[in-house]
Image (cartoon, rainbow, N blue to C red):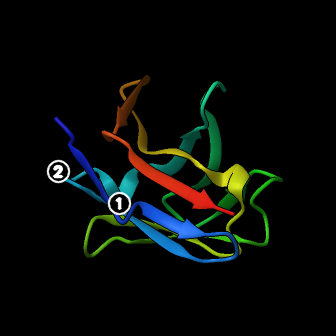
């Protein structure tokens, strides 16, 4: 079983920065695609960014150029550096781990980290 523990959320003024971290238990981290999703008030959860096991990254258009996702396989940790934050970035951010084994897709989620951007 995989556990994901997020940290680094909080409240920041518009234009500021925050870094989220997500530590994963278990041995599959290196083989997994890691992602950060977010759910803003009254909206559906959406992908903010993800990174494959070989380091390829993908960003939502709304965060491209402001957010950077990275991973440290030695620490089983994925990060989301968020710069130039806007009020519309206010959301609960969820860490996600995806991997496939024996033709079955496995999906794990963290508990969520609140990010609030004030104007």
Give the crowd class for mark 2: few <14, some 14-19, many >=20 residues within 10 Å.
few
Relative depth, front residue between 103 and 61: 61
Residue at 68% from the left image edge and 69% from the top image edge: 14
Which image quarter holds the N terminus? top left
The number of numbered badges drawn on the structure is 2
Q: In the rendering, at what x and y percent does residue 52 appear? A: 55, 56
Q: Seen in the image, is 30 located left or right of residue 35? A: left
Which image quarter holds the C terminus? bottom right
Disc number for residue 46: none
Residue at 66% from the left image edge and 26% from the top image edge: 43
Asked if marks 1 and 2 touch (Cβ < 8 Å), the reply is no
Q: Is label 2 in a helix, a strand or a loop?
A: loop
In this view, the residue farthest toward the front is 119
Give the crowd class for mark 1: few <14, some 14-19, many >=20 residues within 10 Å.
some
Quadrant assignment, res 24? bottom left
Quadrant assignment, res 56? bottom right
Quadrant assignment, res 7? bottom left
In this view, the residue farthest toward the right is 61
Q: Seen in the image, is 49 located left or right of residue 74? A: right
Residue at 64% from the left image edge and 42% from the top image edge: 47
Q: In the rendering, at what x and y percent does residue 8 appear? A: 36, 66
Q: Measured along the vertical axis of the image, is residue 50 above or below residue 69? A: above
Q: In the rendering, at what x and y percent does residue 102 appear? A: 36, 26
Q: In the rendering, at what x and y percent does residue 116 appear? A: 53, 55
Q: Measured along the vertical axis of the image, is residue 23 above or below residue 37? A: below
Residue at 67% from the left image edge and 67% from the top image edge: 85
Relative depth, front residue between 78 and 17: 17
Task: Estimate the spatial distance between the alpha carbons at disc 1 and disc 2, rounded to whole Å.
Answer: 10 Å
Relative depth, front residue between 63 and 16: 16
Q: Measured along the vertical axis of the image, is residue 83 above or below residue 33? A: below
Name the residue carrying label 1: 30
Name the residue carrying label 2: 26
């Amino acid at each position: 079983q995989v556990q994901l523990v997020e940290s680094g959320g909080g409240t920041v003024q518009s234009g500021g920065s925050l870094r989220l971290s997500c530590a994963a238990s278990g041995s599959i981290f290196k083989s997994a695609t890691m992602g950060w999703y977010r759910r803003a008030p009254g909206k559906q959860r959406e992908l903010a960014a993800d990174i494959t096991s070989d380091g390829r990254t993908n960003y939502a258009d709304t965060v491209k150029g402001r957010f950077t996702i990275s991973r440290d396989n030695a620490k089983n940790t994925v990060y989301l550096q968020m710069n130039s934050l806007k009020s519309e970035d206010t959301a609960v951010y969820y860490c996600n781990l995806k991997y496939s084994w024996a033709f079955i897709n496995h999906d794990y989620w963290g508990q969520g980290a609140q990010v609030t951007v004030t104007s």
